[in-house]
Image (tube, rainbow, N blue to C red):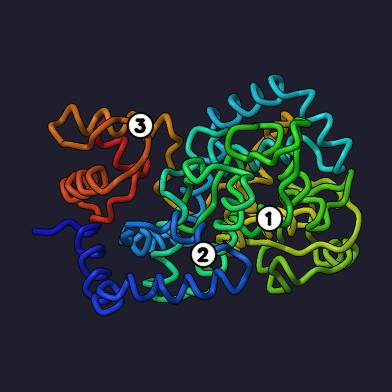
Amino acid sequence: MLTRSATILVAAILSTLPAYADFDGCLSGLRASATAKGVSASTFDRATRGLEPDMKVIELMNNQPEFKTPIWDYLATLNDEEKVAEGQQMLRRYSSVLAAAEQRFGVDRHTIVAVWGVESDYGKSGGKMPLVQALATGACLAPRRQGFFRDELVSTLKIIERGDLEASDLKGSWAGAFGHTQFIPSTYLRLAVDGDGDGRRDLVNSVADALHSTANFMAKAGWQTGNTWGYEVDVPEGYSGPSGRTGKHPLSSWAARGIKKVGGGALTGSGNAGLLMPAGRDGPAFLVFKNYDCAYSYNGADSYALAISILSDRLKGRPGIQTAWPTDDPPLSRAERRLLQTKLAARGYDVGEADGRIGQKTRDAIKEIERQIGMTPTGRPGGRVLQALR
């Protein structure tokens, strides 16, 4: 029997067989488009010689964690104690680089490091897919957003042609994000800057370039120096007023509706704010300002923007989210996920390395445990399964 992952991959391949068969023809069309936009034919030919599609791109495109994972699971691994401790180490190690970025762009160092931590775990997991192959696959075979992939492929080829980075350095995610803080190629061309003074913009091998470029991104997105991204609030029982990141109102309007800071404090901050309730009325709620929108613009998901925002607070020594998420099956940190995998392996399940990354083998093993304890088999790494294994 095929695993769910294999079934998805087979379905993706079958659904694109005509296009797959004409991948070379598609590349010919992309060559004409790229040369029309200023990429030399020789650069295109060198970068695509012998190129074959990677269908993993299509599978990953349909399984983006920030949109499919429950927000409490998503945040649990990006705001855990390990992430905070490592981030504080980075703050100390790169204090002079971050001080220069703050001075240059007006974006606080904790936010810069939080982006770094969320995007690539401080440079440890930036992605391994060759960008030309991934983007060409998307440009020819993706069920949607082919225009995005084509544009990013052209941008990648421009980076190669200009000599900013070697083609071998351009490895990243299925969508083309690369480097310490995961810029997509078009964003690199617009916003990457030299942070170490060597005259190059190298987001792969230079931490300084990556951190300065991230600060530049936030500044160009409208970052307001000295202002907060937002904070957690208490919402009155039975609240039925406006909500959403974009529905911003004066703080006086929210105060009149009975909204207060968690713990009862008065609302503070500069400018209008939106009320964010990412898990509905029964979960945590936040008032979010312009700086939150800057984090949101990096990826376009509230779960992502909250991960950066909460991590930046925790790097400052502030507490994390205070209100419980509306679930009776609590999320697991990375350390707890590793423990879960270790205990599954001890019971004879093949889950691979106990690294905290939940792949299909781990999910299949979790489903077996869920069946044994009378739960619906979902494959989700949650507290109830870990408790059963303990």
Q: Could you tell whether 316 is left or right of 24 in the image? A: right
Query: Mark 3 or 1, which is nearer the eye?
Result: 1
Identify the mark nearer the N-term, 3 or 2. 2
Q: Which residue is mark 3?
A: 355
Name the spot of residue 385 as percent of width and height, x first: 29, 41
Query: Mark 3 or 2, which is nearer the eye?
Result: 2
Q: CA distance from mark 3 to mark 2?
A: 43 Å
Give the number of callouts.
Answer: 3
Residue 63 vertical position relative to residue 262 in the rendered view, above or below: below
Query: Mark 2 or 1, which is nearer the eye?
Result: 2
Name the spot of residue 143 as percent of width and height, x first: 39, 75
Residue 316 vertical position relative to residue 46 in the rendered view, above or below: above
- Seen from the viewer's position, the closer of residues 199 and 225 is 199
Q: Could you tell whether 262 is left or right of 84 in the image? A: right
Q: Which residue is mark 2?
A: 41
Secondary structure under badge 3? loop
Q: Amino acid at mark 2?
A: Ala
Dot 2, crowdedness within 10 Å: few (<14), some or many (≥20)? Answer: some
Q: Which residue is mark 1?
A: 189
Q: CA distance from mark 2 to mark 1?
A: 20 Å
Q: Amino acid at mark 3?
A: Asp
Q: Amino acid at mark 1?
A: Leu
